[in-house]
Amino acid sequence: MADITALPSEAVKLFGSAASESARPSSPPPLSREEACHWVRCPDDDLAELLRSARDLRYRFKPGVITYSRKVFLPLTNLCRDYCGYCTFRRDPGQPGAHTMTPDEVLAVAKAGEKLGCTEALFSLGDKPEMLFPEMRETLRHLGFNSTLHYLEAMCELVLRETTLLPHPNPGLMSSEWISRLSAVSPSMGLMLETTNEALLAVRAAHDNAPDKVPTRRLRTIEEAGKQGVPFTTGILIGIGESAEDRVDALLAIRDLHQRYGHIQEVIVQNFRVKPGIPMHGSPEPSRGDMLRAIAVARLLMPEVNLQAPPNLSDPDYEDLLAAGINDWAGISPLTPDFINPERPWPHLQELAERTRRKGFELRQRLPVYPEFLSRLASAREPLASRLSASAAADGLARVRKRTAA
């Protein structure tokens, strides 16, 4: 097995360790729920103070650098048994655009991304479509698999063996067994909590007819990943019918799990955007002030957790989000669109670097797993161990390779 145990020592010098928080500069205690609920609704006159506090904590955590992951987006299947009111990604069998990628398609996209310097293969897919659609069961039978998760596992391993990319799967709800199996072929994985407000499961609400969006079930998956020590990405989706206090409660649920298990490698604050044809097409989008407040409160609640917001969902002035304390721009692809938000193209990477520089930061490419979490993967099996060793630079960020285009 390749030796990756030497990587974290250098990474810790720059980024700290998920297991040794005491080595970092002391920070004020995180906000209480009462304080967070105050600040998430603070008047405009107090917003500058909130943002200043969030920026200070970001500086204590990771000064001077904003990261991103250079990725390819692999929509393994867009068939899904959930019908979320804000989603244009999902399809029923027979609908225009319904598709399950073949292994050849997966490998072709991954290899094309490899040539462009990508280090992440982001797998996004509908949640257990075979449980609802006989057509998906037939597709899986034809491919030689019993379930979508079996197929995902095989595709993660294919990417690991045939390319230099590292898989990051987002497959929805997972059992303990499946978290363990997928962690053998990916250094990290993710599941958006979105919200803890069960009222959004009601008829005509955002999660009506979406059995996999029950908050307690999603929290159970995130907790199980923590029990297994899997570096995990999660976050909240704002503007889907929740209150400002609901945003705080969802962030607190994430914080509580991280305090117990230390496995939350990043928290995403994502804003709802209206799309034609969705059930929520008439719903208001969250304002820029809503985003700034939610991000800043997330930073104050979790001072030493990586915090990100997708720039393409806040264009044209996405760089303003840096004022609220994020330290990461999420995954950006030079090759594939954002299949979840296809109407919102990612910024060109040179533009992203320049806008980030103008705000006083250096843009650096990371792996799908953050530097301070590499130590959790010291016992990774092949071929994951070799890929990690080859992909990580001495500081734990991505080893930048020569590429054919930006």
Image (cartoon, rainbow, N blue to C red):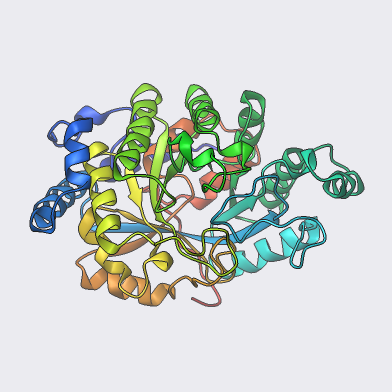
Drawn side of residue 302 relative to residue 388, left or right:
left
Residue drawn at point x = 39 percent, y = 76 percent: 350
The spot of residue 20 in percent (x, y) is: 28, 28
Q: Nearer the viewer, residue 365 or 265?
A: 265
The spot of residue 15 in percent (x, y) is: 29, 44
Q: Nearer the viewer, residue 33 or 280?
A: 280
Q: Nearer the viewer, residue 386 or 254?
A: 254
Q: How many numbered marks does the figure carry?
A: 0
Report whether residue 181 is seen.
yes
Residue drawn at point x = 55 percent, y = 34 percent: 214
Residue drawn at point x = 76 percent, y = 58 percent: 101
Residue drawn at point x = 33 percent, y = 48 percent: 307
Quadrant where the N terminus sits is top right
Drawn side of residue 88 relative to residue 370, left or right:
right
Q: As drawn, which residue projects farthest toward the front?
A: 203
Report whether residue 188 is seen.
no
The spot of residue 186 in percent (x, y) is: 59, 41
The spot of residue 363 in percent (x, y) is: 33, 64
